[in-house]
Amino acid sequence: MNSEDSLIQIELNVLQDIATIIADSRGQIVESLEKCLKILKKNLDLENCVIYKLEDDMLNIFASIDFNKHQKIISEYRLGEGATGLAAKSMEPVVIENVHNDILFLNKSGNRSSDTISYIAVPMIVEHETIGVLATNLTKSTKIDFDDTVRILSIISSLFAQSMYSHFVLEDEKEKLKDLKQYYKMEWDSKVHNFGDIIGESKKMKDVYRVIERIAQSDVTILVRGETGTGKELVAAAIHKRSRRAEEPFVKLNCAAITDSLLESELFGHEKGAFTDAKETRKGRFELADKGTLFLDEIGDISASAQVKLLRVLQEREFERVGGSKTIKVNVRLVAATNRNLEQMVKDGEFREDLYYRLNVIPIDLPPLRKRGEDIKLLVNFFLERAVKNHKKMVTITDEAMDKLMGYPWPGNVREMENTIERIVLMGDEKGINAADMLLLLPALKNEKLIEEYKTISMENRTLDELEKEAIAKALKDCSNNQSKAAEMLGITVRQIGYKVKKYGI
């Protein structure tokens, strides 16, 4: 075998050994790459073999041999800086034939022996984008010339690039799954209400279904409007399930349940040390919902500062975490919801007009339960069947009791109904619930004046806030200002009624 054939065989052996190591890396990417770099050094007499990773226009050492800890830290290059940065920027190999008299050879690490003659930097490219640089020093004893070195390093850099890219994608997916698992666990643990899928055959609900079917496949922003407890979250979930993003995350946040100081952290995440309790970096809801759908309930309750940042995300699809400077880009479909009069809030200077128009691209108005006619009976039977199954107690509702439920105004809407039916099953007689029993199980039914006023209230030219305020004020009056009893009457929690009392200045 002549000298040339011998060198070719050495190169083939190097490629085979490196390919074998990469194929068997099993997630230990840095260790595997450093084994590969040692093969380059041993078989081709190359020195200071190093792999740089490109991130935020900076090249930092990802894997190396013959570099100590300090040298790794100081050996960073901006995109386009020196031979290393130039290779990354130009996406072409850069060869320094004589390192002693070429200003492109910066040698920031100072890691160069007296035998060093040349330097080669080869870009690592995946899908037409540079993800890093493979670089090495040639010495007097290097076995192959410039052209052969560039050729074999170009092949090897492609193997390294694909291996690193696959590793990064896998790690990102693992991190995303970990974050989503934690998020869904929190959602499950804190879940109080679960109405199942949307139930209703009334004309008003069929109008809602038609809108959902028409806009679900687009990425347009949706604003769902309706009183508390009408099922705004269910509409958002229905839109997500019917969209092209159905296999991606559906992430939720109730803006009214979070204090102003924590809301931005919940939305955009925070860096470690951003504030006193920020003991670790945490992704916000926008990052968790990337490629999926984000549902923001009670959007009318966010602070002025959060409004500015939310507007930017909707316009630019990017943001920074609290305490961070790195710009994060996301692809999120937003569905917002409110029971407030945003138009009046815009007039009063409480809500940004530009954000309002960004949110109100496609409005969906959910009707209150009292306007849904026979849907009340459908929902009663649905919740009754589920409660009977859960509590293993057979309870039936007589026709006269059903008439009482049909005539009740349901100020707390579907949420109040769910609580009511749960109470009926727990406390009711298995012989059947009659009208008299219903008065005991639903105390608000005793207040005929409240029901009559609900029946005679004109819904025209009345805002949701006005109706809600009036309902809460009446309930408090009937309960001698006892918020716990009033909350029970309305089918909401004590925390919710406390928030509404403060909100409306009742």
Image (spheres, rainbow, N blue to C red):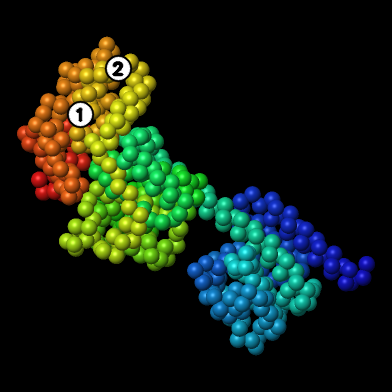
User: Which amino acid type is shown beneath numbered disc 1?
Assistant: Gly
User: Residue beneath label 1, please?
Assistant: 407
- Label 1: state its secondary structure: helix
Assess disc 2: are there few (<14), some (14-19) or many (≥20) residues with their C-alpha within 10 Å of its C-alpha: many
Q: Residue at x 23, y 36 (%)?
A: 370
Residue 74 x %, y %? 52, 72
Mark with earlier residue (1, 2)? 2
Residue 95 image position (x, y, % from top left): 68, 80
Crowdedness near tag 1: few (<14), some (14–19) or many (≥20) residues, C-alpha within 10 Å: some
Numbered mark located on residue 177 in the image: none
Q: Residue at x 78, y 74 (%)?
A: 148
Instruction: Determine the residue located farthest toward the right in the rendered image.
Output: 1
Q: Residue at x 45, y 62 (%)?
A: 329
Give the quarter of the figure containing the N terminus. Answer: bottom right
The image shows residue 332 at horizontal and vertical percentages of 43, 56
Kind of residue indicated by mark 2 = Thr
Q: Could you tell me which secondary element the residue under label 2 belongs to?
A: loop
| Marks 1/2: CA–CA distance | 18 Å
